[in-house]
Image (cartoon, rainbow, N blue to C red):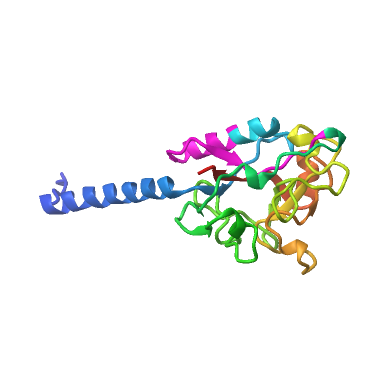
Amino acid sequence: MQRSKVLPAGIVVSMVLTGAGAIGAAHAQQATMTFFVTSVGKGNGADLGGLAGADAHCQALAKAAGSPHTNWRAYLSTTAPGGEAGVNARDRIGKGPWHNAKGVMVAKSVDDLHSESVNITKQTALTEKGEAVSGRGDPVNMHDILTGSDPNGMFSTAGGDTTCGNWTKSGEGSAIVGHHDRVGLKDTRHMKSWNSSHGSRGCSQDALKSSGGAGLFYCFVAN
């Protein structure tokens, strides 16, 4: 009969402390996380249930990942009928600074977020789980991130549907998307934009997928 080995008390204590340290570090990272790309969309194309539904999705994902923050907001703009002013994504997310799940700062302020020095790249635009989002060149490209915004983070005045019916459509229509990896088919300024690269081919899940998307969007703590 083989006897089980008994580890010395010091080693057992060390293992416990190491495990506790790893858990503590993970919790600390989630506490500092104030920005992420949704790991999954809502599953119905660009129909997010409006801004309220998108905010709730941000909150649910963040909570599941262990975030203590309760004021998550989706980075999405909306338009209004009759030429009235819509909602600007940049006005929904607070003042900054914002850090990803690894503690890396992506922007120190709203102006920094919408400047050439913004630190949103494929390496920093992580999900709430701290995972990278696949982009152009990967087996599955999901770099089209819904924003409905112009480069300054404001609702578009280009005309036509730019927000998939203010995030309520999953059929016809279009929404402006950005590229989280800052890469596109053509090496142009728009293709390198994290928040305003081009319009989607439609609002359904399949339409978003056809141009390199999955109905993902950015979430920020409105600090």
Q: Image check: 223 left or right of 186?
A: left
Q: Image check: 103 left or right of 77?
A: left
Q: Is residue 98 above or below residue 85?
A: below
Q: Residue at x 13, y 48 (%)?
A: 6
As drawn, the residue found furthest toward the bottom would be: 187
Residue 177 seen in this snapshot: yes
Image quarter where the N terminus lies is: top left
Find out whether residue 37 is within the magenta segment: no
In the depicted view, which residue is nearer to us: 47 or 23? Answer: 47
Residue 53 spot, x, y in % from top left: 64, 31
Q: Residue at x 48, y 36 (%)?
A: 64
Q: Is residue 201 above or below residue 134?
A: above
Residue 159 spot, x, y in % from top left: 88, 45
- Part of the protein shown in magenta: 56-80
In the depicted view, which residue is nearer to us: 208 or 49? Answer: 49
Find out whether residue 62 is within the magenta segment: yes
Q: Residue at x 44, y 40 (%)?
A: 67
